[in-house]
Amino acid sequence: MLFGLDGVEIGLIIVFLCLFGGIMSGFPVAFAIAGAGVISFAIIAALDSAGILIHQAIDTASPEYAALIAEGIARDAISTFRFPELPRVEEALFPGGWELALDRNLSFIVNRMNERVIAGASIETLLAVLMFVMMGITLERSKIANDLLTTMARVFGPLPGGLAVSIVIVGAFLAASTGIVGATVVTMGLLALPTMLRNGYSPQLATGVIAASGTLGQIIPPSIVIVLLGTLAGDIYSTAQENRAALVGCSDALTYLGEPAVVSVGTLFQAALLPGIFLAFLYGAYAFGFALLNPSKAPAVQLEGGRGSVVTRNDALTWFLGVPAALIFGAVALGQLNVIGGQSTIVSSFSQAGDTASLRTNVSPQCAEAMIELHGQEAWDQALAEQSAIDDAGGVELARQLSDEELAAAEAAAIADAAPIGTGVAVLFIGLALVLSVARGINPLADPRPIVIGAGGVALAFLVDWTLIAPDTSPGATFVLMAIPLAVTLWGVAPAFGRLAQNELLRVVFPPLVLIVAVLGSILGGITNPTPAAALGAGGAIMLAAYRKLQEEGRSGGTILLATLALVIMMLFGINFDLRMGLETTTTGDVIAMAIAQIAYHAAFLGLLYACWVLLRTGVLGPVVRETAKVTSMVFTILIGSQLLNLVLISFGGEHYIQQFLQSFDSELKVFLIVMLVLFILGFVLDFLEIIYIVIPIVGPVIYGGTFDPKWVTIMIAVNLQTSFLTPPFGFALFYLRGVAPKEVTTGHIYRGVIPFVLIQVVGLGILWLFPSIVTIVPSLLPNN
């Protein structure tokens, strides 16, 4: 044995030395990873052929090994780490020769590329990466960050540490709208850092808060890290839980766990929302606390600019807080009383199938013992009682087709149970009422008549829906009846939007906020998965950027606004009408709605084409497309290179060796702590992409194969990876900031500035560890897709 080390251990050392050497060589990371795989395989194959690398494998023919098998210990659970006293046999690292390993690797590579990159199940989710990148770069090119930084600095500047707090808020906002760390850090470094230094801010605080806030895009959805981690986590978790079930004698993970072993990117977006906001809060709290303790290093600043009428405290409390709170809480209360709710009268033509037991009980004794250990004796006894009751009743009742009388009775019951006011109407008109309230607060001295008329239209809409519209009213009749209240409300809302435009903060924040709500709302609400939402975000960003360019040129953006209105019409008609043609139940109203939806579709499509032409004419679209192609190709090339490196590890047993080492610990908690510590250390020298694609596939089967919630595990990893952007000496955010910082700001200032925020990251991880409900509460409340 060379140096007293096992051949697999030497192979692992060679692989990681080649990897770090390739990364430090200056070659593009994507090619360095693939090259490290090829070179390390050649070195290991040469040493193995020379008889230098010897692997000490367990002697599976020994009586000791047979005794362990007889005791019921699974073969996969037997390793040299758990049972070091077992007899060993010496064998080559490649028992069949490196030629056979290479032949197997080539076939593995083809299969892995097909699964992960070309036509696998995860390719649709990975397409979201491309469109989220395009959305972020387009918004960055539209100078949204410039306006946000200027406006937030004016709002928060007069507070102690206000400029630093404004940076955190803008960083969180850009994280939800762009998610591109490099673009965010560079933009804020160019715009905010000179202003902060000129107003007496400490270089350490200024650089630290800019670098840290710029990395929030790694955790706040829509996050590329979450998309990439989610595609891996879903496959790894499912496979790991199937293996876990097999080890305890159960037929599958669904039987053992009592629920499907799945985790989706949409669910992970829901889980990441609160942790991202929480980290932003910690950053802002530190900046504010630093300013209170060191007022000379983070002074209050009064910046010039801003406009709008003077608003008294009473007006602000009434129209910005009191009325909106009354509207929202009133709607929630009415929803609890079933005054506002669903009005669908669609019933299934089949009866509901009977309930099954909470756990499957028809399992082997070994599996039953494992399920009792996992779920508890009480849950098992309850499942037995449920199954006994089902058996006594003749078994699970199967679904059957309802008779005409039963179907009519079910429809009548649905009509009777429907709420008087529909959810869609309530959401639409309460949203318009909120606009009226805020507009009144923005300019209390303006003519109140439009606001009053608009509020009357809202009240009329609720009255019409309650008294004239029944759950079985046709969509066409509903549309006609609601047309007058809607027209009255919009007559008041139109001047309200004009007042909102007079407020600088709302004028800057509102357009991207609408886009963020549309994208995140569709994902977090379970309406769609991340890929269509990303397409909506990319198209919306293009139209928003084009509208801004037209405004800068002094030209009308009416075409873009009409296209946006067409999108809204498409959604409204899609929700309220059955747009499938050729059905037996197709009505005249549905045909008219289909025609209007088709017109709206073509108007929206032509508006998007016009927006692309505007961006192309103004020199924006070309750089956006090139930068999107560069970033996306980098991600996918790293994916391919990392698959090659992983297959090299698999070829000589390195991946299995690492997993056996981690599984040798009896404490699942200890294993996860080790993995998190390794990820944190690797973050000093590796980018998040390399860690995701190289390390997670190796350690994932262990950390996802236990009892921890996969959502919590994934978000903990994501927050840990976020730290890799900040940790000296190779944190990417530090390099981005160093490239745009003034000469008087040294690298030492940047390094010292980020250290408190790295510690905040560690504290944040500790809090998420102690209170995992911060991660799991949102997915438990929202629908999952």
Image (spheres, rainbow, N blue to C red):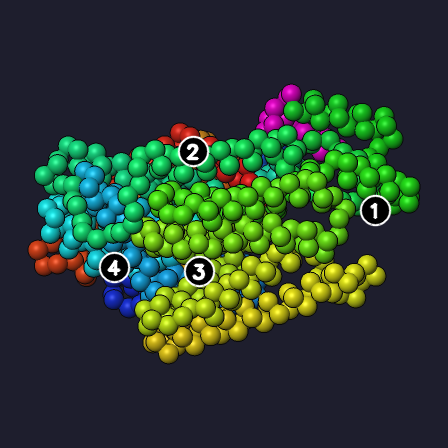
Q: Is residue 364 magenta?
A: yes
Say which element carries label 3.
Answer: helix
* Distance from Cα at disc 1 to Cα at disc 4: 59 Å
Q: Is residue 543 magenta?
A: no
Q: Residues within 10 Å of mark 4 (few under 14, many from 20)?
A: many
* Distance from Cα at disc 3 to Cα at disc 1: 41 Å
At x 33% / y 71%, what residue is drawn?
554
Q: Are marks 3 and 2 in contact (CB under 8 Å)?
A: no
Residue 331 screen position, x and y as percent: 56, 36
Instruction: Find residue 756 and name its label.
Output: none
Label 3 or label 1, whichever comes before in sequence order = 3
| Residue wearing tag 4 | 186
Please give the range of residues in magenta: 360-378
At x 37% / y 47%, what residue is drawn?
446
Q: Residues within 10 Å of mark 3 (few under 14, many from 20)?
A: many
User: Which of label 1 and label 4 is nearer to you?
Assistant: 1
Q: Which of the 4 image quadrants contains residue 64?
A: top right
Q: Give the amino acid at mark 2.
A: Gly
